[in-house]
Image (cartoon, rainbow, N blue to C red):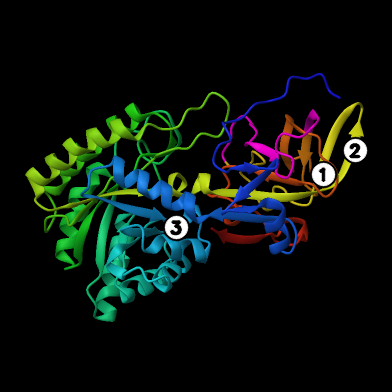
Amino acid sequence: MSSAEPTQHAALDHFPVVDDCLQVGGEPLTRLAERAGGTPFYLYDRALLDARVAELRSSLPADISLHYAVKANPMPALVAHLASRVDGMDLASEQEMRLALDAGVPAHRLSFAGPGKRPAELRAAVAAGVTIILESLGELERVGAIAEALGWRARVGVRVNPDFELKASGMKMGGGPRVFGIDAESVPAALARIGELDLEFRGLHIYTGSQNLSADAIINAQHRIVALALELAEHAPTPPAFLNIGGGFGIPYFAGETPLSLAPIGEALTQRVQEVHDRLGPTEIIVELGRYLVGEAGLYVAGVVDRKISRDHPFLVADGGLHHHLAASGNFGQVIRKNYPVVVGNRFRGNERETVTVTGPLCTPLDLIADRVSMARAEPGDLIAVYQSGAYGLTASPTGFLSHPPPGEMLVG
């Protein structure tokens, strides 16, 4: 066994353990593996989704609207489950639009954001009555032309690229030159043009970053977002019906990371809501979340196919890896690779522990699930479970790479 110090990870307390086996949705992982028809597969827990929504509802002001960013996890059953629990959804493609509409979300509760929307997507969104979040002046003109050609008044909002960033965020989405949104200094001209084209102006979308665990950083960003929105609203052809202040709420993945504290964010938002209502009247304030809603509710499960020792270090080779879960392999945004929380799901504590490296089946050294982690000793047939896998998992991964079979997905509980 290697003498190298094993890496650590975030606390593992989302799922109960009975008889040393993880339980998801009230069922042991071993039984769920049989139900799935074998490994690998993703599991999402309805009860954890509901608990997270309830936590947000109790912590944020009552008149904050909660939207789900479908890109985080577009599994149809999961989207349908959340459809009746959130106030709206944000879309990043025509397929996501159809998915949300099929789940029963009214078109007026949907917004379609993202750069590079194809003309066919814009036409479909105009026809459906979905609010198109404009990302450029060119897109504004294209929507205007489509609306005129179709004879239907398009609903639009403006995504603003502010001149500041969300500090301490894992991924910055605003500030400086960005492909996302219209630079704040160009927004007044865009708003005037919306009026000239007689488009239905719905509101402003200002989003600065994601995966943030600092309540202070989020509070500061929200304060600046609201101040900017109030300034820009003076140039709007009509008062904004909504202000989408984004989210950025993060979840802990690695050692030393602590869960985000919602209480101070909620307290500060109460003041922001009052400022908006004092200036703009009954403008709806939207907090849009993806990862924070679904990330901790999911597991990725792969089966151990082989166990080998290479120069005194044990390796477990699993039947799933980066082609199913690119983020867990460290190849989806990590600058320095860190391990997601990983356990032997059917031997959570185990009678024997070891420091081991877990790989997938692909013929590339990038296919690494966990490197030098301390876990129960596992053998072929055991189940490797990767936590924090409810967001940016299957659809964020190169499933066609090396032509291995795709994993299953189940929503349980």
In magenta stretch: residue 229: no
Q: Looking at the picture, how far across and down is residue 37, in whole percent?
A: 73, 64
Location of the N terminus (image quadrant): top right
Q: Is residue 244 above or below residue 252?
A: below
Q: Is residue 376 above or below residue 290?
A: above
Binning the other alpha carbons within 10 Å of mark 2 as few (below 14), some (14 to 19) or many (20 upward) gives: few
Residue at 56% in and 39% down: 333
For marks 3 and 2 on the same chain, the one whose residue lies earlier in the sequence: 3
In magenta stretch: residue 352: yes
Q: Which amino acid type is shown beneath numbered disc 2?
A: Lys
Which residue is under mark 1? 317
Q: Which amino acid type is shown beneath numbered disc 1?
A: Val
Which residue is under mark 2? 308
Q: Which amino acid type is shown beneath numbered disc 3?
A: Val
Which residue is under mark 3? 70
For marks 3 and 1 on the same chain, the one whose residue lies earlier in the sequence: 3
**Labels 2 & 1 near each other (Cβ < 8 A):** yes
